[in-house]
């Protein structure tokens, strides 16, 4: 397994990885990552390799959409703002401690001009472009799952969107990023896994014994 979306990280993955963890906020970013990875593979001698991609996935699930939204709102209210701003400062490579949390995020440099870790930075730009968030809203998305693909809704709504990524070829599975433990993980098992099994997109029993076998890498 490899993780990291920098040029060096993708080059390393293309040569040695059987699978990669990725950070993609939306389908557009996921398609770009898959394209970069495939282009790098073609530059290598072993150009027929297929590397599995497992994007991070954050879920807030409820019996109704409103219940799921309430779970996210309740977690956002517990946000440690000072700590979250320090983390944002690290991601953006600038001091964000004086940003007003109830106002829109200030303009940021394009990714091409950014000199820090570019993968997470591109994700932040995608979140801003998609949601036009306040600083506090941005912190909420980052604090719960680092800007990974975030789905809020009923089991049916969530699995609908998971299937879009699977069918688009940008995900071979997902790396779960529960916003709370054990609650969010228990919710995923109780609500989302049965819906996935109903649609035959998740196994009903294990056929192997190792992690490699479970990922279909044998």
Image (cartoon, rainbow, N blue to C red):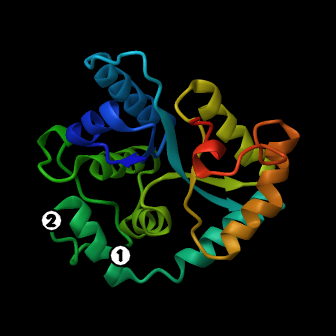
* Residue depicted at 77% across the width and 48% down the height: 206
Query: How many residues crowd around disc 2 within 10 Å: few (fewer than 14), some, or many (20 or more)?
Result: few
Q: Secondary structure at mark 2?
A: loop
What is the x, y in percent for residue 160?
Answer: 73, 39
Q: Which residue is mark 2?
A: 94
What is the x, y in percent for residue 71?
Answer: 67, 71
Q: Secondary structure at mark 1?
A: helix
Nearest the eye: 137 or 160: 160
What is the x, y in percent for residue 201?
Answer: 76, 37
Q: Which residue is mark 1?
A: 84
Instruction: From the viewer's perspective, tell me whether residue 175 is left or right of residue 163.
Output: left
Mark 2 or mark 1, which has the lower sequence index? 1
In this view, 102 is above or below 106: below
| Residue 100 in view in this figure | no
Instruction: From the viewer's perspective, tell me whether residue 21 is left or right of residue 14.
Output: right
* Residue depicted at 53% across the width and 75% down the height: 76
**Whether label 2 touches label 1, CB < 8 Å:** no
Query: How many residues crowd around disc 1 within 10 Å: few (fewer than 14), some, or many (20 or more)?
Result: some
In this view, 72 is above or below 116: below
């Amino acid at each position: 397994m490899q993780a990291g979306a920098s040029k060096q990280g993708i080059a390393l993955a293309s040569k040695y990885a059987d699978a990669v963890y990725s950070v993609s906020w939306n389908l557009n970013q996921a398609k770009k990552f898959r394209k970069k990875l495939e282009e790098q593979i073609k530059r290598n001698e072993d150009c027929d390799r297929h590397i599995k991609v497992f994007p991070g996935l954050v879920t807030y699930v409820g019996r109704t959409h409103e219940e799921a939204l309430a779970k996210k709102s309740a977690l956002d209210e517990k946000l440690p703002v000072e700590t979250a701003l320090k983390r944002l400062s690290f991601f953006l490579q600038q001091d964000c401690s004086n940003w007003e949390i109830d106002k829109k995020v200030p303009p940021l440099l394009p990714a091409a001009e950014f000199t820090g870790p570019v993968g997470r930075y591109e994700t932040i730009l995608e979140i801003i472009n998609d949601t036009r968030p306040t600083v506090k809203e941005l912190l909420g998305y980052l604090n719960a799952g680092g800007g990974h693909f975030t789905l809020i809704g009923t089991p049916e709504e969530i699995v609908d969107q998971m299937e879009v990524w699977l069918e688009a070829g940008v995900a071979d599975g997902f790396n779960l990023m529960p916003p709370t433990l054990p609650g969010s993980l228990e919710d995923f098992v109780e609500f989302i896994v049965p819906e996935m099994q109903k649609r035959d997109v998740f196994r009903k029993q294990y056929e192997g014994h190792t992690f490699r076998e479970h990922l279909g890498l044998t």
